[in-house]
Image (tube, rainbow, N blue to C red):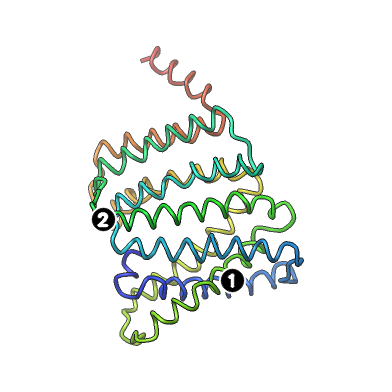
Amino acid sequence: MKYVVGVLPPVGAQLVRYAVAALVMLAYLWRREGSVGLPRRDLMMVACLGALGYGGYQMLWSTALQSTGAGESALLVAATPVMVALIAAIVGTDALDREKVLGIAVALAGVVVVVAAGRGLELDADLVGPALTLLGDLLWAVYVALAASVLRRHSSLRMTTWAALAGTAVMVPLGAVQLRDVDLGAVPMLAWVAIAFSALLSVAVGNVVTFRAVRLLGPTRVTNYQFLSPVVAVVVGALLLSEVIVPGQIVGGAIIGAGILVARGDGRRLLVRAARSVSAG
């Protein structure tokens, strides 16, 4: 998407991306479950959540991406699991215990190490981009935390489809205005491929799988895995762009993994294994 927003206006690109994803999910929902509707009491809630989590978040994040460094953006987005844990505990969709708090803190520290060891934090005097990113994080966290209650009654595919439709509708006014003067025929094929990849895999498949996991494990445990995003980015950059992985990034990745294990409740087991390894070594 960093490449795409350099070719297309940010909200216009997200409108195309989410329109494709929502239509594909709608067709698949009909084929898989035989219907596409939601009860009225849930439809309004899912529509509001989708407007925040997909419409509001994507408009803010993609706009901020134009003026925010990659490392700084990765660090700011990593605040999302912290927000999800706090909001879920407040609204009662998940419990927040000592191990989860400790795991989140450790994983967040690992993200700082990964980002600082690689591209750096790229802190800038212009706070507009970071502020938009954090506001988007908050909207997404509200969506994830509150969606857990809807997932008790409906499949992740059904909820995600309707949330994506609502998010697409929110993006239509601004996105259509941004695309009005764009010569779509001049857009490089690689940009369309990137949008298709992001729509079908990142939005459709990724979100349905994520919220299936939220239904099974709760929002806090699932969003903790978002801490792995900077690590995955480092590995993909090495494989596709021949970027060098530095030792600090490996250390940071290990810290993130340890934090996730602690948040899962595997903290004691992890410490025991570490103690045994030290004594054996």
User: Which sits earlier in the primary sequence, circle 2 or circle 1?
Assistant: 2
Outermost residue, top side: 279
Q: Which residue bears the numbered disc 2?
A: 126
Which x, y percent locates residue 55? 51, 66
Report the label total. Answer: 2
Horizontal side, residue 180 vs residue 164: left or right: left
Q: Residue at x 55, y 68 (%)?
A: 167
Q: Nearer the viewer, residue 176 or 128?
A: 128
Callout 1 environment at 10 Å: few (<14), some (14 to 19), or many (20+)? many
Q: Secondary structure at mark 1?
A: helix
Labels 2, 1: front one:
2
Q: Is residue 229 above or below residue 96?
A: below
Q: Amino acid at mark 2?
A: Asp
The residue depicted at 59 percent of the width and 59 percent of the height is 208
Q: Quadrant of residue 133?
A: bottom left
* Residue position marked by numbered label 1 in the rendering: 165
The kind of residue tagged 1 is: Leu
Residue 82 in the image: state x and y as whole percent: 48, 41
Q: Secondary structure at mark 2?
A: loop
Rendering coords of residue 113 (x, y %): 31, 37
Query: Residue drawn at (62%, 43%), measured in percent from left and top?
Result: 218
Judged left or right of residue 145, residue 250 is: left
Quadrant position of the N terminus in the picture: bottom left
Q: How far from the left and from the top, in percent, is residue 80?
A: 47, 47
